[in-house]
Amino acid sequence: MDGLTLVVHAGYTRYSEERSAPINGETDLSFLDWKLGVSYAIKDGWTVGGYYVDANNKDFWKGSASAANADLKDLNRSTFYVTIGRTF
């Protein structure tokens, strides 16, 4: 199908040092992340896409402090998102 693109990503973030005090039982900050999705070029430079992203080492990153406020966030939670964009 013209205009349809499969998007696959895998990455690894390695921290060279571990924490001396465990967070949720974990001392290693390193994690593997991945994304799987599709994008579709509509016309006139418009593109729409849908993607699923996830990562491991959820125990360490669960309950991380938010940069915006005092809330705690689960930074490695899995999620699905949709994008729409246009190239000029």
Image (tube, rainbow, N blue to C red):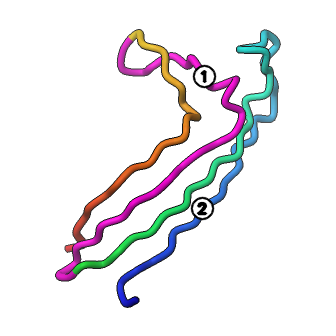
Q: Is residue 18 above or below residue 77?
A: above
Q: Give the range drawn in magenta.
A: 43-69
Taking 76 as reference, is 8 above or below it? Answer: below
Query: Is 44 within the magenta?
Result: yes
* Residue at image mark 2: 9
Residue wearing tag 1 = 62
Q: Residue at x 49, y 22 (%)?
A: 73
Give the alpha-carbon distance from disc 2 to disc 1, as whole Å.
22 Å
What residue lies at 80% left-to-right and 21% top-to-bottom? Answer: 27
Asked which secondary structure carries label 2, the reply is strand
Query: On the rendered structure, is 53 left or right of 13?
Result: left
Residue 87 relative to residue 59: left or right: left
Snapshot quadrant of residue 76: top right
Residue in the foreground of this view, choosing between 77 and 9: 77
Q: Do the residues labelled 2 and 1 touch (CB within 8 Å)?
A: no
Residue 28 among magenta residues:
no
Quadrant of the rendered structure where residue 86 is?
A: bottom left
Residue at 79% in and 27% down = 28
In the image, taking residue 83 as reference, residue 12 lies left or right, namely right
**Residue 80's spot in the image, x, y percent?**
44, 48
> Residue drawn 60% across and 61% down?
9
Q: Which amino acid does label 2 sit on?
A: His
Mark sitting on residue 53: none
Identify residue type, mark 1.
Answer: Lys
Where residue 63 sits: x, y (%)?
57, 17
Q: Badge 2 local density, few (<14 within 10 Å), some, or many (20+)? A: few
> Which type of secondary structure does the marked residue at label 1 adopt?
loop
Q: Which quadrant of the figure contains the N terminus? A: bottom left
